[in-house]
Amino acid sequence: GLPREVRIHEVGARDGLQNEQATVPTEVKAEFVHRLAEAGLTTIEATSFVHPKWVPQLADAAELMPLLADLPGRYPGVRLPVLVPNERGLERALELGVREIAVFGSATESFARANLNRTVDESLAMFEPVVARAKAAGVRVRGYLSMCFGDPWEGPVPVAQVAGVARRLYEMGCDELSLGDTIGVATPGHVAALLAELTGTGTDGSGPAGGGTVPVERTAVHFHDTYGQALSNTLAALQRGVTVVDASAGGLGGCPYAKSATGNLATEDLVWMLHGLGIRTGVDLARLSATSVWMADRLGRPSPSRTVRALNRQ
Ligand code: HMG
Ligand code: MG
C-alpha cells in the first residue's frame, strides 16, 4: 500500500543553488526559503557549512541563517537543516543556532575522494565526532549517502556495497538516512532491490543478506532526474514504505563534484503525483510553482519542471 502522508525534504536552496553558475544574492536566497515555507514546506534545507572554496555558491551561509531566524516562529514546526561535513562546519552551524544538520557520505571511493577529499573510511571517521557532538547538543542529524545506484567513475554500484556503508552511517547515530541517486541513473527495480537489502522490506518477504537493517521509517530517498526516472523511482520507494522524499523546487540542482548530475526531482512534479494519489503533503502547489517561476526569473532560465511549465502555460 501507499502512505497517507509524505514529508517532503525540500533541497532547492541547497542542492539547487550549490550548482548555479550565477551568484544568487543572500537576500534572494532568504526570500526563496521564506516563500517555500509560505507554500507549506516544513523541512527546508537552507545551505551548507562546507569549505567556502569548495562550494562558493553557499559561502554566505553565516549571513543567510540570521535572515531565516524568524521562520520557525512564523511557521511552527518548520525545520531548516544544513549540510555539515566536519567539526569545523558543525561549530560554525551551532554558533548560529542551527537545530538540524546533515552529514554526507559516499557509497563509492571515487566520489568520497572527489567530494570530501577523503576515503570512505576517512569520511566516516570525520563524521563520527560531528554526529556525536550534534546529538549531545540535541541537534537532529540526517545522513546522506551518495552514489547509491551508479557512479560516474565506477559505473553501477553493488547493492551490498551501498547497504554496507548505509548501515555504518545509520549506526553512527543518524536519525534519518537519505539514499542519494546523485547522477540520476536509478530505475525502479534497482530502488526496490536496494530498499529490500537495506530495510528488509522485500516484496518476496526475504530479509537482508547481511548485517542489521535500517528501519524503513528512518529512510528517505533523494533522486536526481537525469534520465527522467525520479518519479517512477519515488513511487517504487513509497510502495516499500518510504515516507520522506527529497525534492527541489522547480527541479533546480546537481552536484558540482559529480559531472553528470542534473537537477533533483522537482517538488512540483512530486506534489502533482502525490496529490493525484490522494497522499497529503501540506504543500500549496500553486504557491510553490509561483515561487519556482519567480526563482527562474532570478536565475535567468526557465524551470525544467514539467509541472511548473504546465501550470504556467499562457
Ligand atoms: P579539505 O581540503 O580536506 O579540508 O576539504 P581540511 O580538513 O584539510 O581543512 C583545510 C582548511 O579548510 C582548514 O583551514 C580548515 O579550517 C578549513 P586552514 O587550517 O588550512 O586555514 N575548513 C573549513 N572552513 C570552513 N568550513 C568548513 C571547513 N572545513 C575545513 N566546514 C572538506 C574537506 C570536507 C572541508 C571539503 O571537501 C568540502 O567542503 N567538501 C564539501 C563538498 C560539497 O559540499 N559537495 C556538495 C554537497 S554533497 C551533494 O550534493 C550530494 C547530496 O545532494 C546527495 C546526492 O545527491 O547524492 C547531498
Ligand atoms: Mg543531491
Image (spheres, rainbow, N blue to C red):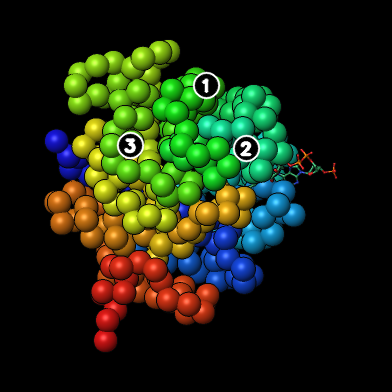
- Residue type, label 3: Val
Q: Nearer the viewer, residue 132 or 52?
A: 52
Disc tally is: 3
- Residue type, label 2: Ser
Q: Quadrant of residue 127?
A: top right
Is the CB atom of the residue marked by disc 1 within 8 angstroms of ligand 1's nearest atom? Answer: no
Label 1 Cα neighbours within 10 Å, binned few <14 / some 14-19 / many ≥20: some
**Residue 290 placed where, x, y %?**
35, 74
- Check the picture and name the quadrant holding the C terminus: bottom left
Label 3 Cα neighbours within 10 Å, binned few <14 / some 14-19 / many ≥20: many
**Residue, disc 2:** 110
In the rendered structure, which disc, 3 or 1, sits on the residue that comes first in sequence? 1
Residue displayed at 53% across by 32% down = 107
Query: SS class of the residue under badge 2?
Result: helix
Residue displayed at 33% across by 36% down = 190
Q: Outermost residue, bottom direction? A: 314
Asked if residue 125 is positioned above or below residue 142 in the image, the reply reads above
Q: Quadrant of residue 66?
A: bottom right
Residue displayed at 62% across by 37% down = 110
**Residue, disc 1:** 168
Is the CB atom of the residue marked by disc 3 within 8 angstroms of ligand 1's nearest atom? Answer: no
Left or right of residue 23, residue 214 in this image? left
**Residue, disc 3:** 191
Left or right of residue 149, residue 165 in this image? right
Query: SS class of the residue under badge 3?
Result: helix
Q: Nearer the viewer, mark 3 or mark 1?
A: 3
